[in-house]
Structures are given as C-alpha cells and as structure tokens.
Image (cartoon, rainbow, N blue to C red):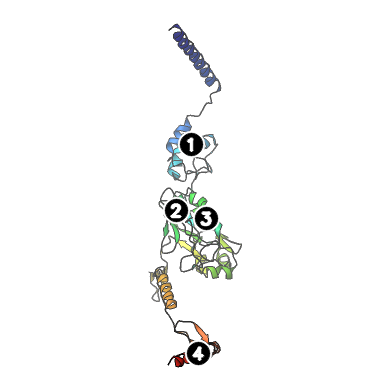
Amino acid sequence: MNLILISLAVLGVTGLVAAVLLYFVAQKFKVEEDPRIDEVQEALPGANCGGCGFAGCRAFAEGCVKADSLDGLLCPVGGAPTMKTVGEILGMAVGNIDPKVAVVRCNGTCEARPKTSTYDGAKSCQILHNCYVGESACPFGCLGCGDCVAACEFDAIHMNPETGLPEVDDEKCTSCGKCVKACPRNIIELRKKGPKSRRMVVMCVNKDKGAVARKACTNACIGCSKCQKVCEFDAITIENNLAYIDYNKCRLCRKCEDACPTGAIHAVNFPPRKVKTENGEVKTAPVAPKAAPKVAEQPVEKVSEVLKVSKPVAAPVKSGVESCSSGVELSVEKKATLNNATQPLNNTKQNGEEAKA
C-alpha cells in the first residue's frame, strides 16, 4: 500500500514540475500576434478559395495587417464591400477596385467546329488534353468535359448542351480563379467586368495561321489585323496570329466588332444597336434569331446513312463474272473448269446405272 502511495506522489510531483517548466518556456518563446488579424478574418467571407493569392482567409488577413497599404490586395469573393470593412479595421484607405469576372475565350460551337473523332474515355479535360488534340480539329479550343464546372464552388459556370461550351454567370462569379487553374488549355481568363457588365472580348485562342484556324473552326480569329487598324485607342494587339483586346485600354466603341470578318470579337451585354430608317427615325435593329441547334439532327443523318449502307444492294454482274445464289462470285473460266472436272464423274455414274439395268 505504501509503495502505491509513494508512486502516485512521485508521479504527481513530476507532472507538477513539468507543467511549471512548460509554462515558463511558453512564456519565454511565445509569439505576440496582432489582435487585428482575428478581426480582419472575421470580416472575410471565409471561403478559403485562394483567389486572393494567399493560402486562405487567415493568411490573407495576416498579409493585410502586415502590409503598408491595401493596394494590390483584394478578396474576390467579398469584393469592394469586404475590402472597405478591412480598411476601416486597419485604418487604411482602399482604392477603386474594378471587379473581374471569368471569361471563356472560345466560341467553337458544335456547328462551327464539327467533330472529327469521338473520345470514349474518362470525362476529364486534363486527361483528354494529355491524350490527343481532342474531338475536333482545333488544338486550342474548349474540350467540353467540364473540369471548370467541377472546380467552381459557387455554381457560377455551367455547360451549355447546345453549344458544348461552358457559360459563366456574371452575378454568381466571384473571380476566385479556380476555373482558370482547372482549364488545361488556358481558355478561361479573369477580365475586368466593365461598366454595366459590358466588355469586348476576342472569343478565340487559336494561334494557328488563318487558313488552318478557319478550317478547324469557322468562328476562329485569323489574325487579319483589321480590328487593330480600326482601333483608335491602341487596345488591340496581334501576336501569334491571334488578336487580343486590352481591357484597360478598351473604350467599348465596338468598331473592332464591325471590322472582324469571322465574328470572333464579341460585344458582351450590350443593348441592340439603333439604326436610322429612310424617314430619319431611329429604331432598334432587329436581333437575328439564333439558328436552331443541329445537335439532334446529326445523329438522325448518321442513322439514315447507316441504314442506306446496311441495306442489301444487288451486286452488278460484270462481264465475265456471274453472281452465285450464295453471294459468292465466280468467274466464267473458273466455272467452266469446275464443270469439266465434274464431267467424268457424271459419266461414270451414268455408266454404272446402265450396267445395273
């Protein structure tokens, strides 16, 4: 009994001494943390998307507290209201922040970019990109497997079944950049949202020469430089047979849209144009109705073609060739040879029958 009590006493004293030592060590080496970090973190949405360039909301809060100014720091999910709250906590001024949105720079619809092959593997853009050029002849266009849709945590991007392309919802997009990282062909880009969500975009990333790009997709940019010539603000550059519009210089005049011969430049969220009639009245130009998608028509045509091919067709009898009932064609010479070979057998059979009679 005494042995047990002594053991318990020794263990208790040892634990108490260790606790005291750990307390003094923790006080000696403790790191003082700015209490504003917790306040900034509470003001953030807590999405931990990484769109700000930091590992998470905690790391972003530490970066804001340690920074001398908030220039270049932006929470894409919270936007301007969140950054205004952060500035009030830290006592710093927040500059004008231009909201951004993800833009899919590809207009290779099913009609403009027909399929040249069929992929029957794992439905992943990354895997398909590593395997071969894709189901169409364009080696730069959207693969349509939806990796960007799976990467989005805000339900802001969906695949359009008629065009086979992803579409971004401007209201839901937080410009976190996850879809940009998920795309193996770098088709998706974060661009300035623009006033009233209006912007000019070259919806093509094909860097092949004009004839090759046009053959792969009828909506492709051919690098003709017509848009660059009409731009008065030096906002368009041509590099690697591809036009690009700098959203910081673009003034949304839409002259480049009219000059583009292939329709690769799109004016997003603009109202319909107004035209003058012969009487001098200004009316809204009618919007051309979109053509009905031919996605459902293609399988029907293919099935009809298969039926036509699979339909039995009588083979034409050529000179010197006769068609057998079994479907095997024998030449006249071979047929004569067979008849000559069987003639002695027939004669022998007849002689035997006469002898028996």
Dot 4 alpha-carbon crowd within 10 angstroms: few under 14, some 14 to 19, many 20 or more: few
Front position in the image: 19 or 156: 19
The residue where tag 4 is placed is 348
Q: Is residue 221 shown above or below 339?
A: above
Front position in the image: 79 or 116: 116
The residue where tag 3 is placed is 127
Disc 4 marks a residue whose amino acid type is Thr
- Which mark, by number, is residue 58? 1
Residue 184, image x, y percentages? 53, 54
Write the residue at 50% across / 56% down.
125
Dot 2 alpha-carbon crowd within 10 angstroms: few under 14, some 14 to 19, many 20 or more: many
The residue where tag 2 is placed is 149
Q: Is residue 187 visible?
A: no
Give the SS element for disc 2. Answer: helix
Mark 1 vs 3, N-terminal side: 1
Dot 1 alpha-carbon crowd within 10 angstroms: few under 14, some 14 to 19, many 20 or more: some
Q: Is residue 45 left or right of residue 339?
A: left
Disc 3 marks a residue whose amino acid type is Ile
Write the residue at 56% across / 56% down.
130
Q: Is residue 146 visible?
A: yes
Disc 2 marks a residue whose amino acid type is Val
